Image: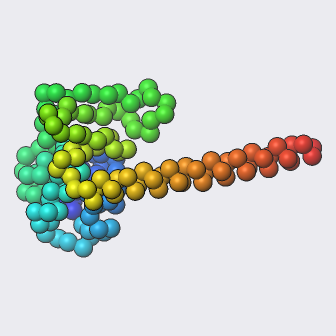
Amino acid sequence: MTIKDRVLEYCNIKGIAISTFERMADLSNGYFKKTSRFPHAAKRKQISCAFPDLNMSWLISGEGEMLNPEPNGSVHINQDHNTNSTMFGYVNIDVPEKGKQKILNADGIVVETDGCTNKQIQHYRDIIDSKDEQISRLLSIIEEKDKLIASIMERM
């Protein structure tokens, strides 16, 4: 099994596309299509930072478990009954060590900020800003359609 195969297996378990994996780890689009060997140390750190539950030893060699064991301070949040959630099942969150901050991103992955670069944090902020703009555009479209429907209904 190749590294790309293991990344695809992880993505399948997490319910994300490989392009999402690459974007979240701040890798270039199509990174795993372009390379057949394992990423150098800086790229491994980016992957590890973006996906702390991913066992890097498993990713490198295929040996051991795919996911790191849950730490003792782990908290499970059931998303099944949250009508506003697009996630299904559980989101695992481990309590951060003193002096560290963790971010729960939209895919349910916890990111530890002291190990992440400012570039990655800005990348996540850019994604959020882009989604906020998209939501605003969609709301405008819905409002225009509602007005059009109301206008048509008045004519009937």
In the image, 147: left or right of 39? right
Q: Looking at this view, is 100 or 69 the one in front? A: 100
Colour logic? rainbow
**Quadrant of res 137:** bottom right
Please determine whether, in this image, residue 65 is positioned above or below residue 117: above
Q: In the rendering, at what x and y percent does residue 6 appear? A: 19, 56
Extreme bottom residue here? Answer: 34
User: In which quadrant will I find the C terminus?
Assistant: top right
Q: In the rendering, at what x and y percent does residue 64 appear? A: 7, 46
Q: Residue at x 18, y 47 (%)?
A: 114
Q: Residue at x 21, y 52 (%)?
A: 116
Please determine whether, in this image, residue 112 is positioned above or below residue 124: above
**Quadrant of res 112:** top left
Q: Residue at x 40, y 55 (%)?
A: 127
Query: Residue 18: in sight, yes or no?
Result: no
User: In which quadrant will I find the N terminus?
Assistant: bottom left
Q: In the rendering, at what x and y percent does residue 48 appear? A: 17, 52
